[in-house]
Image: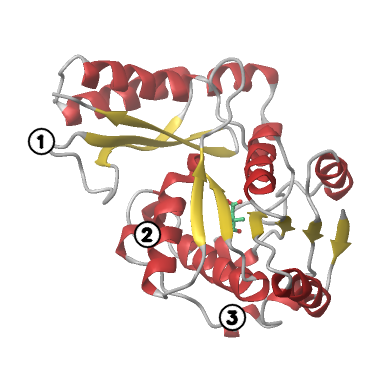
Amino acid sequence: MEVIQSISDLREKLKSHRDNGKSIGLVPTMGNLHQGHARLVESAAEENSITVVTIFVNPLQFNPGEDFENYPRTLNEDIEILENLNCDYLFFPKNDEIIERRSSDQALIKAPQISRILCGKSRPGHFDGVATIICILFNIICPTTAYFGLKDYQQYLIIKKLVSDFRIQVGIKGIETARDKNGLALSSRNIFFSSKELKIASQLFFSINEISKALHAGNKNFKILEDKAKRQLSIAGFLPDYCSICHANTLNPADSNDKDLVILVAAHLGSVRLIDNLRVFLNH
Ligand code: PAF
């Protein structure tokens, strides 16, 4: 694996692969890699000739007071993980290689409406920052296919819409969430939990599973199910942000005729804001 820091070096390498007809799989990350990222890299490597992973903690997607400064940065460990996967290039650019030095003057993409609800409501501008960095990376790398974790389900839908609206020629693939033995979705931020908090954290998946069971059993009292889950989370020690049963494509609140649903949840535990979701297909 080659570690590359400059845009021009990466462009040059990838151009020669492209000229030789090779497909390029891209896995954009912010580092502190775990098994969830490994699955993305494995899928990219299986389906493409060349695999590029990027590590860039993107300041544009953090609001003031969020954890940009404290976001875990573990380059050496990340390189070791990637060396054991079939990754060809790690692109690890410096901040000013990627975004305008005075970040207040950086051109920004306005993410579509679907970015203003759920996580976008609590983190205004977050998805504009994500959309912007993803466009920058797509412009540098011109991947055949890019891989994203479905844990960030809203992000995945926004990126699909971005690519469709801007006519960007890249396939977008969502990869199933990797979980620990208690069901907790793997996340770079889990390292901030104490062992006691880690146990509590798995309640998040438990709550959305309970909702899923109720939906499969024919319960369509969405509001009551959402409120009950939020209450359970509060009792367990979380500060719930939202728990919403939505249509899986539009993220509109679920309607009793909808069959393809997603349950999305976000809650704070200690200093960490956790998110998770569960897709539910109903046949009644
Ligand atoms: O999901 C993430 O880690 C980030 O939002 C992404 C897609 C790498 C953009 O910075």
Q: Which quadrant would residue 49 be assigned to in this image?
A: bottom right
Residue drawn 48% across the image and 41% down it: 150
Quarter containing ligand 1?
Answer: bottom right
Residue type beneath disc 2: Ser
Query: Which residue is at the far left?
Result: 257
Q: Secondary structure at mark 3?
A: helix
Residue carrying label 3: 104
Which tag, 3 or 2, sits closer to the chain's start? 3
Residue carrying label 1: 257
Distance from disc 2 to disc 1, alpha carbons, whole Å, reads 24 Å
Q: Secondary structure at mark 1?
A: loop
Query: Which residue is at the far front?
Result: 20
Residue carrying label 2: 115
Residue type beneath disc 3: Ser
Residue 81 as seen in the image, left or right of residue 245: right
Which label lies toward us, 3 or 2? 2
- 38 and 24: which one is in front? 24
Which tag, 2 or 1, sits closer to the chain's start? 2
Distance from disc 1 to disc 3, alpha carbons, whole Å, reads 45 Å
Neighbour class for label 3 at 10 Å: few (<14), some, many (≥20)? Answer: few
Q: Secondary structure at mark 2?
A: helix
On screen, residue 48 above or below 241: below
Point out residue 182 in the picture as x, y percentages from the top left corner: 56, 15
Tell me, yes or no, if residue 117 can be seen here.
Answer: yes
Which label lies toward us, 1 or 3? 1
Residue 42 as seen in the image, left or right of residue 216: right
